[in-house]
Image: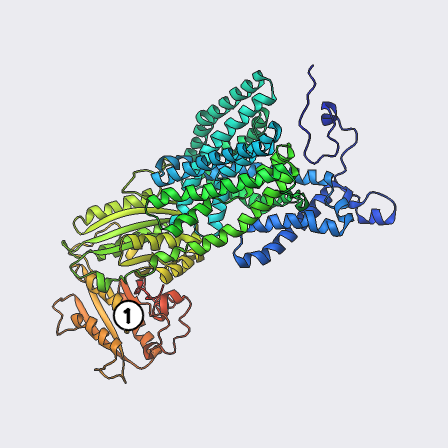
């Protein structure tokens, strides 16, 4: 029987063991201590000699030091990975130098093996989740700019790095064994790893910006090409370190595994998705089986000569990204992986760094490593800028993209740590590379923030609103947002009321906003351009069908373009504002975050959507309307606003730019023969009817068409209400609005007038203004709905 010679366990002090020592353990491992009192009362083992208490204390110390560093560094915009590396350097360098007892008891070489084992297990799950979050089919939809950038940012730096390697080897007389170590640095530094770039753009809050999407697309291309090249390099390397038949056997097993993933695992995952009813959670048995198989894939990959992380990563690629299966796995595993394991991976690896080992002038390998890293980084920055500049991307944005593609993170530091453990890197090389990753982790985010500002695209943008850009007989461009399926009826009814007649077109851009779950990169889908998504699944199917029916019923007066945006909730406003900017929309219509039961009581509040509405109000490049559905306009979804029906609209006018914008929209709606519009103008009794105040002059001008002497539309009424203060205004509003279907008001934020004085209690939702808040109080009868309009703000 051939004696096995397994690879020694990393961090183990006794590496000379055989098969029997692996499976026959006469002495039980000392896992749990007998407690502190046993140690104090009589001679015995120290509680920290037990592996479990020591591991728990190591985790506590590592997290405490890491978060203390991040508490300081985050104020400078530095991402947490820099704090994790810094924490590892402190634990590995500073504290041991002050206290030798600390080194012996808390972070001895033996105990670090246990910490490494936990970190390695967490990194296996991290690679699995990385595969789950990646949508490989996105590559076939990647534009030429992303495709060529992803190719060039990998190939050119690799070739130039290889040339620098050969040059340094000849000059310094580096042997073949040390030369292989330099090849590891060249390959790893030439790659642009998707997880590292995804973490950076997420930390910078630009993941769904144009630059962030471009960076993720380029990284996806580079990741897939790099995966093929690195696996091939590992197999070729095995030819020189193992018998030829063993290398070919491993290659055959790897090919069989890949075929099994494509033709067995992937269809099984799609079957699980098909078996899961829409809106229902995935069966927990399926989730547990997938996690178990992913861990088994790591064992299989280790058997055929690949890294233990390769199998779980490829297995994760077979899982359909996003809901329901991908998001279920991410929600199950990601909090533990991202919150516990990944910080341990980075910190434990950084603890192996010895700053005194970095001697670039004395060590030829370290000197060659520094030269290769410099060549690869400079080549990557220069090469990445070429395709964007050719595509007329601004120079600052192209340079920011080059920096993003040059970033290094958890994948690189973990790869270098693995290479050090298997002696593919020296301790000096590893220490230098760790410090280099730390420096780039600090510098690159700061430079990207300086170079790229997502809000810059709004600078100098022409003011756009209904009053100035949508004449009564011209085209009205509306961006309607959908958060939930129950938003559809109210939005469609509002749009039907906004379609006045043939020859006066309403162009509707419908944006279905979906939370980013179970995938790393955001998606923005134009359903006019493609019938299905790249994952061959149809997002927003119900939304598309509903608005297609609306378009057919209003043929000639309405044109609909549906979109879907899948992005982080905190950054959704960027998708809304960007689409409004690109399509030159005059108004964005947002659903209110609160939902009511049919009896008028509150059903639910979604504060995430409320924050989204507030962000859009602050940044929108056009006017914004918040539609509050109290139940009346949504119930008519099955009926069309026909000539014989009557839809009653009230417009409350107090004065100001927001009220003028709201009145302009109401006047356009009044051209629909099914609309009965009543304009209520509230005037303070002490005011003069004729005033030279410019705001009041503008108010009179926009009101001119609805006054009886100029109004020839019998369905439009103009009512003047004289009031002294806010309580009178509220009483009059409460007496008239319950009989209407829709009430339109201006937001009038931070506008104090006598008509609203004394209504300070009506400020629960500042995004609605005082009048809007008064209209949704629970004590106000009626099931009317409200549209609160804000004209585009002049400052962005």
Q: Position of residue 344 (x, y in %)?
A: 62, 44
Residue at 14% from the left image edge and 53% from the top image edge: 502
Q: How many marks?
A: 1
Quickly name the residue at label 1: 657
| Left or right of 55 on screen, residue 786 | left
Vertical placement of 401 versus 227: above or below? below
Q: Position of residue 324 (x, y in %)?
A: 44, 40
- In front: 740, or 66? 66
Vertical placement of 72 versus 530: above or below? below
Image quarter of the C terminus? bottom left
Vertical placement of 75 versus 25: above or below? below
Residue at 53% from the left image edge and 58% from the top image edge: 76
Q: How is the image coloured?
A: rainbow
* Mark 1, other Cα within 10 Å: few <14 / some 14–19 / many ≥20: many
Please indicate, yes or no, whether residue 518 appears anywhere in the rendered image. Answer: no
Q: Position of residue 393 (x, y in %)?
A: 35, 48
- In front: 564, or 428? 428
Please indicate, yes or no, whether residue 663 appears anywhere in the rendered image. Answer: yes
Name the outermost residue toward the right. Answer: 42
Q: Quadrant of residue 459?
A: bottom left
Name the outermost residue toward the top. Answer: 1
Q: Quadrant of residue 630?
A: bottom left
């Amino acid at each position: 029987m051939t004696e096995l010679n397994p690879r020694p366990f990393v961090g183990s002090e006794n590496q000379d063991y055989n098969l029997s020592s692996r499976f026959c353990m006469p002495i039980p491992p000392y896992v749990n201590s007998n407690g502190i009192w046993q140690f104090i009362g009589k001679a015995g083992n120290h509680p920290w000699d037990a592996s479990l208490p020591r591991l728990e204390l190591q985790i506590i110390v590592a997290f405490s030091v890491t978060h203390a560093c991040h508490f300081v560094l985050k104020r400078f915009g530095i991402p947490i990975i820099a704090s994790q590396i810094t924490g590892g350097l402190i634990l590995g360098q500073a504290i041991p130098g002050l206290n030798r007892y600390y080194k012996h008891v808390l972070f001895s070489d033996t105990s670090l093996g246990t910490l490494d084992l936990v970190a390695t297990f967490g990194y296996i799950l991290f690679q699995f989740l990385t595969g789950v979050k990646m949508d490989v089919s996105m590559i076939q939809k990647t534009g030429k700019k992303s495709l060529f950038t992803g190719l060039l940012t990998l190939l050119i730096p690799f070739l130039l790095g290889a040339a620098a390697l050969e040059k340094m080897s000849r000059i310094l007389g580096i042997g073949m064994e040390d030369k292989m170590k330099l090849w590891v640095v060249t390959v790893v530094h030439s790659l642009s790893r998707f997880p590292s770039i995804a973490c950076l753009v997420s930390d910078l809050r630009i993941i769904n910006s144009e630059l962030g999407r471009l960076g993720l697309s380029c990284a996806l291309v580079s990741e897939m090409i790099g995966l093929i090249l690195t696996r091939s390099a590992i197999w070729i390397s095995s030819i020189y370190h193992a018998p030829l038949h063993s290398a070919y056997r491993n290659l055959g097993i790897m090919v069989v595994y890949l075929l099994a993933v494509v033709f067995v695992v992937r269809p099984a995952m799609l079957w699980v998705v098909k078996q899961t009813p829409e809106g229902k959670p995935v069966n927990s048995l399926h989730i547990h089986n997938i996690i178990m198989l992913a861990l088994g894939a790591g064992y299989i990959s280790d058997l055929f000569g690949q890294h233990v992380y390769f199998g779980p990563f490829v297995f994760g690629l077979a899982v359909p990204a996003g809901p329901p299966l991908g998001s279920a796995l991410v929600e199950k595993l990601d909090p533990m992986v991202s919150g516990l394991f990944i910080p341990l991976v980075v910190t434990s690896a950084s603890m192996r760094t010895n700053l005194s080992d970095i001697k670039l002038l004395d060590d030829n390998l370290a000197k060659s490593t520094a030269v290769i890293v410099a060549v690869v980084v400079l080549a990557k920055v220069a090469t990445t800028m070429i395709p964007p500049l050719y595509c007329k991307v601004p120079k600052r944005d192209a340079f920011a993209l080059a920096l993003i593609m040059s970033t290094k993170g958890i994948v690189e530091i973990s790869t270098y740590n693995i290479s050090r453990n298997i002696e593919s890197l020296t301790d000096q090389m590893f220490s230098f590379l760790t410090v280099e990753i730390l420096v780039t982790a600090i510098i690159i985010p700061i430079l990207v923030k300086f170079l790229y500002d997502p809000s810059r695209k709004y600078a100098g943008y022409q003011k756009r609103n209904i009053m100035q850009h949508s004449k009564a007989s011209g085209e009205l461009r509306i961006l309607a947002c959908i958060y939930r399926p129950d938003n559809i009826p109210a939005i469609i009814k509002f749009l039907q009321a906004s379609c006045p007649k043939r020859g006066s077109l309403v162009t509707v851009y419908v944006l279905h906003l979906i939370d980013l779950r179970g995938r790393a990169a955001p998606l923005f889908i134009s359903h006019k351009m493609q019938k299905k998504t790249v994952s061959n699944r149809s997002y927003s199917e119900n939304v598309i069908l509903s608005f297609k029916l609306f378009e057919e019923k209003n043929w000639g007066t309405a044109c609909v373009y549906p979109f879907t945006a899948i992005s982080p909730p905190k950054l959704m406003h960027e998708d809304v504002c960007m689409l409004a900017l690109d399509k030159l929309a005059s108004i964005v219509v947002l659903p209110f975050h609160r939902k009511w039961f049919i009896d008028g009581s509150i059903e639910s509040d979604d504060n995430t959507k409320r924050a989204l509405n507030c962000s859009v109000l602050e940044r929108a490049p056009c006017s914004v309307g918040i539609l509050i559905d109290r139940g009346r306009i949504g119930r008519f979804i099955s009926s069309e606003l026909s000539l014989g029906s009557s839809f009653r609209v009230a417009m409350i006018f107090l004065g100001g730019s927001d009220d003028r914008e709201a009145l302009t929209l109401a006047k356009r709606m009044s051209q629909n023969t099914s609309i009965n519009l009543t304009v209520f103008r509230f005037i303070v009794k002490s005011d003069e009817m004729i005033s030279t105040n410019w705001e009041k002059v503008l108010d009179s001008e926009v009101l001119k068409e609805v006054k009886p002497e100029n109004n020839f539309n019998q369905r439009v009424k103009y009512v003047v209400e004289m009031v002294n203060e806010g309580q009178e205004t509220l009483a009059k509003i409460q007496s008239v609005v319950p009989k209407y279907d829709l009430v339109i008001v201006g937001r009038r934020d931070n506008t104090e007038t006598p008509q609203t004085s004394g209504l300070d209690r009506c400020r629960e939702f500042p995004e609605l203004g005082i009048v809007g808040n008064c209209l949704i109080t629970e004590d106000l009868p009626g099931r009317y709905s409200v549209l609160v309009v804000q004209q585009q703000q002049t400052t962005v």
